[in-house]
Image (cartoon, rainbow, N blue to C red):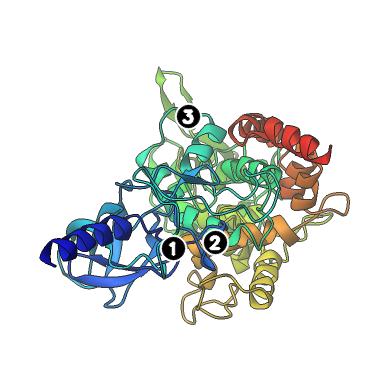
């Protein structure tokens, strides 16, 4: 009897560890208990999504006590059978990582383990090498429903190794992209390849969620001039806190005369010197010093004379850095003949900075932030319980704080805003970027994303050339052709 019981226990152990880990399986990390969530669209086992080794993002694991994973490595002891080219997870599979409880509590290292697999019974035909593969749901190209990975992104942007910053940003968006892709137009090889190629450029190679402000004096955005214009009230009001960094006053002997911002404002409006406005807002390096060619100095933009025609003083434009808030406010302010449809107020409202490019797509303009707010209210993003948000809402008492910052501060909103633009953003030839992707038309996809930045079109096309290889677009077409026969 004891021998038979021992034999049955051993058999149960073998069968137990070969159970497939599926959606809803119970997990533990040290003393913390929780549940496993399958985020990818894959075949099911006993009516629930089947776990594979690609399920290793932080949102895959929810713990009942508030514990959260901080970092994860690679699955161990997984099966040898595959679902959509990815190895299946078994009850015996483990995932090393680090996590912590909220508050000032030290992180814990350990590994995620399955307490239960989620399966009701052991599937027939399990052998010692792995677990059976569930049947495919359809005969569509298997890569179309495959998840997005950092490796695919790396190949698209054409780098051998991702920087720590790139890896951090990519890791922060992948869980959301993979949760949303089925419902929001990232469900085919073509759509995924075109999307990643575009946002790779928009996010500066996955290094930022917001538009840079480090423009030089040769700014070519919006109302910036390419030739000299008279200084005016809008310019001095916009730059009123920075005037002492931009201008200096020197007397007839070349000695600097100390002036406050307010004094400079009055003087500039009185004298109306001609300036190239980009040299005020953007980074200005100055001119070469005739006494020392390696040195840069300011330039005289106007000399003011006394009634007797002797020199009174000179207005000097000093070398200086860029001034982000006024710069972006001017770049995205409306002007006569403006076709961008940004919906911003004038430069002094600071709308241009508030609603500068933010998120994965670099959504720009008050009107677009409003459209994204409405889209998100109408469309349900999986696992997002934060409710309706007006991303144009500003914080009372602080004109440069508002919910618009969420697009550049939170990877979930950064991703959602890019998905909105992909599906319903500005169109080119009456079609969205997603629709042009279905036609495999990279030029039209690029112009639907940003038709104003024509200099970037070759870069976008180059990204897609790499994406075509990474996402195996040739193989996609070959598979579809074969299935039609």
Q: According to the image, label 2 marks what residue?
A: 44
Marker count (numbered): 3
- Residue ranking furthest to the right: 429
- Separation of marks 1 and 3 at Cα, in angstroms: 35 Å
* Closer to us: 402 or 465: 465
Give the left or right position of residue 23, taking residue 469 as reference: left
Q: What x and y, as percent, mark residue 428?
A: 83, 50
For the question of whether residue 120 can be seen, the reply is yes
* Closer to us: 19 or 147: 19
Give the left or right position of residue 20, taking residue 1 as reference: right
- Label pair 1/2, CB-CB below 8 angstroms: yes
- Identify the residue at image location x=71%, y=37%: 227
- Separation of marks 3 and 2 at Cα, in angstroms: 36 Å
Mark closer to the chain start, 3 or 2:
2
Give the secondary structure at mark 3: loop
Q: Which mark is residue 22?
A: 1
Q: Quadrant of residue 381?
A: bottom right
Give the secondary structure at mark 2: strand
Q: Nearer the viewer, mark 1 or mark 3?
A: 1
Mark closer to the chain start, 1 or 2:
1
Q: Which mark is residue 159?
A: 3
Give the left or right position of residue 247, taking residue 363 as reference: left
**Crowd band around label 3 with a 10 angstrom C-alpha radius: few (<14), some (14–19), many (20+):** few
* Closer to us: 349 or 300: 349
Q: What x and y, as percent, mark residue 445?
A: 75, 44
Q: Quadrant of the C terminus?
A: top right
Q: What x and y, as percent, mark residue 326?
A: 55, 57
């Amino acid at each position: 009897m004891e021998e038979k019981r021992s034999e049955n226990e051993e058999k149960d152990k073998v069968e137990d560890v070969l159970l497939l880990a599926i959606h809803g399986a119970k997990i533990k990390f040290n003393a913390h208990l929780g549940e496993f969530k399958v985020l990818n669209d894959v075949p099911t086992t006993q009516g629930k999504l089947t776990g594979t080794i690609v399920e290793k993002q932080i949102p895959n694991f929810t713990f009942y006590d508030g514990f959260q994973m901080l970092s994860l490595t690679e699955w161990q002891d997984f099966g040898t059978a595959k679902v959509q080219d990815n190895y299946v997870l078994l009850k015996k599979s483990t995932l090393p990582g680090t996590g912590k409880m909220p508050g000032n509590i030290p992180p814990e290292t350990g590994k995620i383990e399955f307490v239960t697999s989620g399966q009701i019974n052991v599937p027939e035909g399990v052998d010692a090498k792995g677990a059976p593969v569930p049947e495919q749901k359809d005969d569509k190209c298997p890569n179309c429903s495959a998840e997005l990975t950092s490796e695919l992104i790396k190949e698209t942007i054409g780098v051998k190794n991702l920087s720590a910053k790139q890896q951090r940003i990519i890791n922060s968006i992948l869980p959301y992209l993979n949760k949303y892709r089925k419902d929001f137009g990232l469900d085919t090889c073509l759509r995924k390849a075109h999307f990643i190629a575009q946002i790779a450029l928009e996010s500066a190679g996955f290094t930022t969620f917001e538009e840079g402000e480090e423009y030089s004096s040769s700014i070519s955005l919006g109302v910036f001039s390419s030739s000299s214009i008279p200084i005016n009230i809008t310019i001095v009001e916009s730059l009123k806190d920075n005037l002492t960094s931009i201008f200096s006053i020197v007397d007839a002997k070349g000695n600097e005369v100390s002036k406050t911002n307010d004094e400079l404002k009055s003087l500039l409006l009185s004298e109306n010197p001609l300036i190239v406005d980009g040299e005020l807002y953007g980074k200005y390096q100055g001119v070469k010093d005739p006494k020392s060619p390696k040195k840069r100095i300011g330039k005289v933009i106007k000399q003011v004379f006394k009634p007797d025609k002797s020199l009174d003083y000179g207005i000097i434009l000093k070398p200086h850095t860029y001034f982000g808030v006024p710069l972006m406010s001017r770049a995205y302010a409306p002007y006569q003949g403006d076709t961008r449809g940004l919906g911003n107020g004038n430069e002094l409202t600071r709308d241009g900075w508030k609603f500068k490019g933010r998120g994965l797509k670099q959504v720009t303009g008050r009107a677009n932030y409003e459209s994204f707010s409405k889209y998100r209210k109408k469309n349900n993003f999986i696992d997002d319980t934060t409710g309706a948000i007006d991303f144009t809402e500003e914080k009372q008492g602080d004109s440069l704080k508002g919910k618009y910052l969420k697009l550049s501060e939170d990877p979930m909103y950064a991703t959602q805003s890019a998905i909105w633009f992909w599906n319903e953003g500005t169109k080119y030839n009456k079609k969205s970027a997603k629709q042009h992707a279905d036609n495999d038309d990279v030029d039209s996809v690029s112009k639907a994303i940003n038709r104003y930045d024509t200099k970037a079109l070759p870069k976008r096309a180059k990204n897609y050339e790499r994406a075509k290889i990474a996402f195996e677009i040739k193989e996609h077409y070959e598979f579809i052709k074969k299935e039609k026969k």
